[in-house]
Structure formats: C-alpha cells, structure tokens
Amino acid sequence: MATLKGGTRLKSAVCDTQVMVIAAPAGDVALTCGGSAMLEATANAPRGTLDPEHKSGTQIGKRYVNEDASLELLCTKPGEGSLALGGKSLKLKEAKALPSSD
Amino acid sequence: MNLMMLLEMAAGGMGERTALVCQGERWNHAGLFAGAGRIAARIRELPVERVSVLDVSSPAVPLALFGSAWAGRPFVPLNYRLTGPELEALVERVRPLLLITDRERAPAFRGRPDVTVMLREELLELARASSPPPPEDWPMEPEDVAIWLFTSGTTGVPKAALLRHRHLVSYILGSVEFMSADESDAALVSVPPYHVAGMAAVLSSVYAGRRIVQLPAFSPEAWLALAEAERVTNAFVVPTMLARIVDTLEAGGGKAPGALRALAYGGGKMPLPVIERAMRCLGHLDLTNAYGLTETSSTIAVLGPNDHREAAASEDAAVRRRLSSVGKPLPGVEVEIRDPEGKPLATGQRGEICVKGEQVSGEYLGRASRVGPDGWFPTNDGGFLDEGGYLFLEGRIDDVIVRGGENLSPGEIEDVLLEHPAVADAAVVGIPDEEWGEGVAAAVVLKPGASASADEIQGWVKQHLRSSRVPQLIRFEAELPYNETGKLLRRKVRETLGAGS
C-alpha cells in the first residue's frame, strides 16, 4: 500500500471496518484488515473474504498501534476484521486518562 | 478530516444516547446527525458562503455547526451583545451568509440581498423533518476552515480567528476519549456560542457521549437549579460565573448540585480568593483550570483535580503557589517562554508564552498568520514556567505599563489592591504621563458600606510594593466594565482613566 498520511480514511475490503490515520511511518505501509489490503474510503470494490486469522474485530473509537507506535489508527466504523501491519496484528492503544476541561 | 466525523462516530456508536437537552427539548446523537444532514442540504441550496448563528444557546447551535461542516461552509457564531452598528460591520465581512437568529433580531437583516435570514424555530423544524438526510458526502479537506471566531483586538476592531477542521479534530482526539462518558453523565454549558469554549464544549461532549445541558441565560440561581434538575455531573464556567455561584452558595441562596462531580473553569484570570472560596464550598468536586485561546482551539494547559488538591494541602510554598497557575500543557502541545527577540528563556524567567501543536491555528482572516516559520505561536500572554513545568500567567503583554523604562505588570498591582479590606475590585492601566512616558492609574470598586480614600489606597500599595507601582491616579467606580464571559475590558478602563489625567 502507498504511503499514508494523517487524516486519510481507509476501509476494509472484507468487513465494515473503517479507520482514520492518526500517525504513520514513512514509506510503504502494508496495512491489512481481516487479512486483506485496506482500501481508500471512497473506493468501490466487491466485498472479499475475511481471513479467520484476522477476525478478532475492530471497535469504534478505539486506537490501534504497532510495536513502536509509529502507526496509529482510529477506528471510525467497527467491523469483524482485525488490523495488521505487515502481517503482524496491531494492538489496542491504552486509553490514558486524558485531562478533560470542556 | 471534518468535524462531521466526530458526530458520525457518535451517531454510529451511541445513536440512541441523549446528546442535548435545552429547556426540556431532547435530541439524541442519531437525531443530531440526521438533522445536521437536512440543514446541510438546505445550505447547499442557498447562495451563501458562511453560516452564522446570532442567538443565545439552543439546539440550533450544534445543529448549525455540524450542518455547516457537512455542507463545507465555515460556521461563524456572532456575539448577540454587540450593538447594531458593530453587528453590521461583522455581517459585512461574513456575507454572503445564512443568518440564524431570533424574532427580535431578524427584522434588522431581512431585505439584504446578501443575507438569508432563518429563524431558530425554522431551523429546528427543518432539522426534525422526516425527509431523508443527504448521503454522507461532506468535504474531507483538513485545511478547510470550520469556524470563524471574532476576537477583540486592542484597537477594538475584531479579528476573525480561523479554526480549520484539522485544528479542531486534533484538539478533540488529543483530549477526549471516544464514548468515555457514562450514560448518566451530563455537562452544563452556560458559556455563549460565540466563545471558543462554547464550541469546544459541544465537540467534546458529542465525542465523549456526554449529554449537553444548555443554559441560554446565566444567573447563579438558574445555574444551580438546572444543575440539580438535570443531575448535571460536569460543568464549565468562566471566572465571573464561578464567583457569582460561590457568592450565592455562601449567602445560602442555593445548595451545591447533588450530582455535580467535576467543575472546569477558564476563559480569564481566576482570582486566588475565588478559587479558595470555591474549594471550601465545592471542595468535594474535581476542579480543573483550563487555559487556552481562541487561536489555539481553546485549551492548551490544564491544572487538574489532583494538582488543585496537592497545592492546597502542601506546606511547600512553591507547590502551594501552583494553585494560581494554569497547570501543565496538554499532551501534544509544547509551551516555551520567550523574550521580545524570540529567544527561549530559562525556568522561572518571565516572558511571552509561546505554543506549538496541531491544535494551534494562529491564523486570522485577511492577515498573515502569526505562527512563526519554526511553528511557534506567540500568545501575547506573559508568564513563566516553574521547576515542575507548571505555567503561570502574568497578563497580556500589551497591558504592561512602561514607566520610566521599567516594565510594570498591572496584575501584580491589582492583586495587592484586591487584598485591601475595603476593595472589591480593581483594574490597573497605564495612562500617558509627560515625565514617565506612562503612569500607573487604578479604577477601584469599594465593597458595599466600606470606605477608603485615594491616599489610604496609595499608602497600602506602597507598603506592599515598590513606590514606582503606586498608582498616581485612583478613580472610584461603581463597577468595572466586563464582557459577557467575564473578561475585563481593559481598553475601556484605559480610555476613562486616560481622559481624566
């Protein structure tokens, strides 16, 4: 997959999951959901098959990161597939207690 | 990137949850989303480039805010306290626009070819209609301007601060966890929609899933009653509102709302005596001081509940002092103190507060951006950082009085004046002076039944500070000029005292 930048929205080719990129490493990013390469949010493509190895689900509002947190995605629509970078599953970013002020 | 993403997620993840309550009228997130869509469809049919609300808080405000974002037009809330001519001048700069307003104000704008007037009631009816909302096709350009907010300049001509979608989305994602509020949480919003805190409150609450309870017209009694009736758990107030609420509680005019757990305040300097009184009668609450500017998408630093408690309980003067600080920068925000040449200063040194981060805009309509090439935005606020990284405010840089080459901070002298037993309020400004360039003048409001002469007050200041800080002119006033959100209109004080010198 091409380089990603903050704000880009992507969707799964095999389930309902949609994400927005918060941070991404430079260069090509092999991002998958449910085992298949993710698509631009506006792409029109027939739904593919969900890989059972990547089926633990993605939850709305949660953030997902790789090992060194160079990649961070915000899930904007939930789905059955799970996110992975270069085949390695992303993990849930710990929700820090954010200082609320409004 | 678009603000609509925040509402889209809320509608998707918690569509049935109540989003908004105003005078008994309720909206859930799904309804707000559909309503915004219908409003967007109408906006697109009109020859308008911007959408304004000239009205007190109501569900029309969030509906118009999100509807504008969906339609790709900037939202420009206007200050309903302005005079006719002042509003005319702003409308000139915002047109062609859709103006949402109430029955009293509408006639002044009807008949203008570049203004489409819509009553608040009409907008609400449109939002509630059964027609299907349009497809989810809002623009996704992060650089698009989402909101214009007019801020007062020192010359009096308001500047239009521009907040782009990327600034606001970064601010929300950086400070709010999606759906982090419980279903029973509710936030009382009493700040007006034309203030950045009013806009931030809507966006934060929607994303967190916290029910917004709107109070269109503030009075401490109404605030206390509504907070009790709606089982409000969170509230944001400006300092003058907090002072009046505390006055009312101390006078036995009401009781602390039973469900209230967290109170945030900001938008102006919080006098230490007020926060100390608040901690006494509302001390069971989590208190948060939020410092921010319109230009920085609101909050950039917070003094949290634990900070308040630690400072209040500490025997260490340096820690105690933090109760009058504005706390530490938000994650994702950097703060630096710089001298007039732009050189970073050391811990403890006073200079201009500069800030950097994705939520910082610093841009105005028709003017060059005030963000430097290195990405730092000078706030025009003076201050310093202590050893622990806590930020202290010293007032606006422009308010500094330059007397005989010496820089005097009005805040320092005001704090001393406020400690005099007869003084209720005070404002210190510079006035022209042939000998010194500028001289120190003070407008003083005495407590009811108290008396003090100008001599006595000058003597008091001399006792506590160096003689250069003693006001050479003291004028007793019945009250000082404040705007609706409690900001002292220092310019007006300067005009009054300068004319008398």
Image: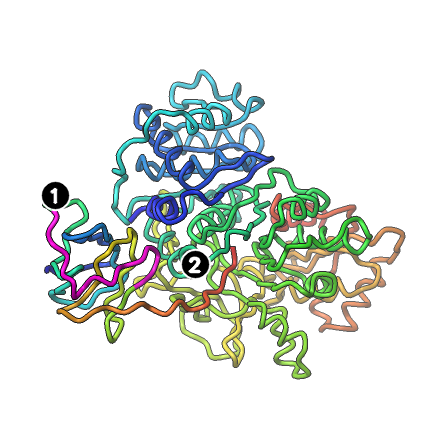
- Which percent across, then down, holds residue B409? 62, 65
| Residue B242, image quadrant | bottom right
Q: Chain of mark 2?
A: B
Vertical comparison of A102 with B130: above or below: below
* Secondary structure beneath label 2: loop
Residue type at mark 2?
Val
**Identity of the amino acid at label 1?**
Asn
- 10 Å neighbourhood of mark 1: few (<14), some, or many (≥20)? few
As helix, strand or loop, the secondary structure at mark 1 comes to loop
Callout 2 environment at 10 Å: few (<14), some (14 to 19), or many (20+)? many
Magenta residues span A47-63
Q: Residue beneath label 1, please?
A: A44
Locate residue B413 relative to residue B67 in the image: left or right.
right
Q: Can you name the residue that lies furthest to the bottom here?
A: B316
In the image, residue B272 lies at what x, y percent?
68, 65
Disc marking residue A58: none
Q: Residue at x 54, y 29 (%)?
A: B85
Return the x and y of residue B484 as percentages of the image width and height.
Answer: 62, 43
Q: Find out whether residue A51 is within the magenta segment.
A: yes
| Residue bearing mark 2 | B176
Kindly identify the residue that appears in the image at 42 percent across and 39 percent down: B65
B318 drawn magenta: no
